[in-house]
Amino acid sequence: MATLGQNLSSITSNGAAANDAVARTGAVAAIVRDAVLTQPVWDMHTHLYPPTFGTPSQSAGQPSDPNGLLLWGVDELLTYHYLVAETFRVVPNAELSYATFWSMSKQDQADHIWRQLFLERSPVSEACRGVLTTLAALGLDPGERDLGRYRRWFAEQEPSKHIDRVMELSGVSRITMTNAVFDDNERLRWLENPQVAADSRFAGVLRFDPLVRDWPAAAAMLSRWGYPATESLDEPSVQNARRFLNDWIDRVSAIYCAVSLPPTFRYESPEDGTYSSRVLSEVVLPVLAERGLPFAMMIGSQLQVNPSLRDAGDMVGMSDVNSVTRLANDFPDNRFFCTMLARENQHALAVAARKFGNLMVFGCWWFLNNPSLVDEITRMRVELLGLSFIPQHSDARVLEQLVYKWSHSRQIIADVLIDKYADIERTGWRVSEKEIRRDVRLLFEGNFSRFVEAPAP
Ligand code: RAT
Ligand code: ZN
């Protein structure tokens, strides 16, 4: 088999064609795997922050802030809401009530989850496996099963240096935040310290779900914050809402704006009589077109079907892809990122992206971020869209999740690409190492940086 880096063009077909074909397949696979595993990625959607936003975790060098926004460390990894949901399946609330669980300290919650999901039964779910991948990559042997030792190790880390280390381990070159302007805890931190996000490792994204999901509630809040707006969305309200967006885009240095939308979200036309269509067509999309910023729609999360689970209580639902195509068609001066939560929506969404160059499909979101589904969705997208999509984002809520979310995804993306290059090579087409690395760069960095019109880090 050819070694990595061997010039692929040196494997010719003079004579032993079958052997050469086998050698090429092996050499291409090795190069693809290396390219995918080493290519830096610009992670386009996370819930991570620089240490300046405070951190609730114990660390060396920074006092802990109970409401801090940067989550990291083993207790945060274990209390990830994906694992909270899995724990309540095996210890139903009849045995340990929701109220009792939420009143426990973070460390006690983590102990409970560790015992139930890692010790009482094997941690085979994707979210459990992720904790193990992450510990191993950090040099903490999961085989030891020693939560106390893991805790001591994390408490010795200095947050900013730890971020560097995690970014290096996960191959993440830039972390895109989700800056939720309607969240008081976050909004006040921006207002108190305009330099709060002065950290070149992080990029800002203005997130404003209530504006599109619940205009009357958003209007009341805007009014309180000095942007008078009425439920009727009259002309002054439109102007003030636009001013609000412009001010916050500037404050956050947003590289795009984003919302999460319910499965019931519909857009027929600017005049379809819904608040969301009016807010989009009169406020959000004109501002973003003027600013040259993309608009990200994450569609399909039905909020709080079980409110007692808090962040873990949301559900998936089928959404309407035609609403997305109508938006892409009616607003050609806007660029749209879109991801959908239902597996059943993935094919139509990829087909929609074939119709509109201003629509960029991204990521395998939340309940789709499981190996079997990432494999299926990535294959289908390559077949329909070639290399013109963004295969994955991490959605990390806890810093070290960058490690497992990217290592698990990279392995699958490499498998898919290896098969796709093998398919085209069977026709006699030859790919070079340079072309493979170029293609991988597009998927991990280039397509995103082109769409946000910002240079890759
Ligand atoms: O994946 C998640 O952690 C979800 O809870 C959400 O954060 C979702 O990704 C979102 O951005 O709304
Ligand atoms: Zn998210």
Image: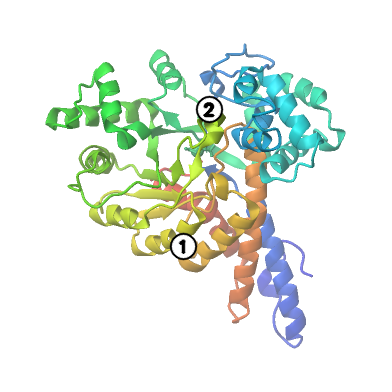
The one nearer the camera, 25 or 367, is 367
Q: List x then y, in percent, for residue 37.
A: 67, 51
Point 59% across, 19% down: residue: 55
Q: List x then y, in percent, for residue 209.
A: 37, 34
The amino acid type, in three-letter code, at marker 1 is His
Going by the picture, which residue comes out furthest to the left? 235
> Which residue is the site of mark 2?
49
Q: Residues within 10 Å of mark 1 (few under 14, many from 20)?
A: some
Left or right of 262 in this view: 169: right
Going by the picture, which residue comes out furthest to the right? 144
Going by the picture, which residue comes out furthest to the top? 63
- In terms of secondary structure, where does tag 2 sit? loop
Q: Nearer the viewer, mark 2 or mark 1?
A: 1
Q: Residues within 10 Å of mark 2 (few under 14, many from 20)?
A: many
Point 43% across, 29% down: residue: 179
Q: Quadrant of the N terminus?
A: bottom right
Question: Residue 32 shows which numbered tag?
Answer: none
Colouring method of the image: rainbow
| Res 215 quadrant in image | top left
Q: List x then y, in percent, for residue 168.
A: 66, 38
> Which residue is the site of mark 1?
347
The amino acid type, in three-letter code, at marker 2 is Tyr
The one nearer the camera, 167 or 95, is 95
- In terms of secondary structure, where does tag 1 sit? helix
User: Which is nearer the N-term, disc 2 or disc 1?
Assistant: 2
Q: Is mark 2 within 8 Å of ligand 2?
A: no
Point 35% across, 49% down: residue: 336
221 shown above or below 324: above
| Residue 252 visible in this rendered orientation of the protein | yes
Q: List x then y, in percent, for residue 71.
A: 60, 26
Point 48% across, 33% down: residue: 177
| Res 353 quadrant in image | bottom left
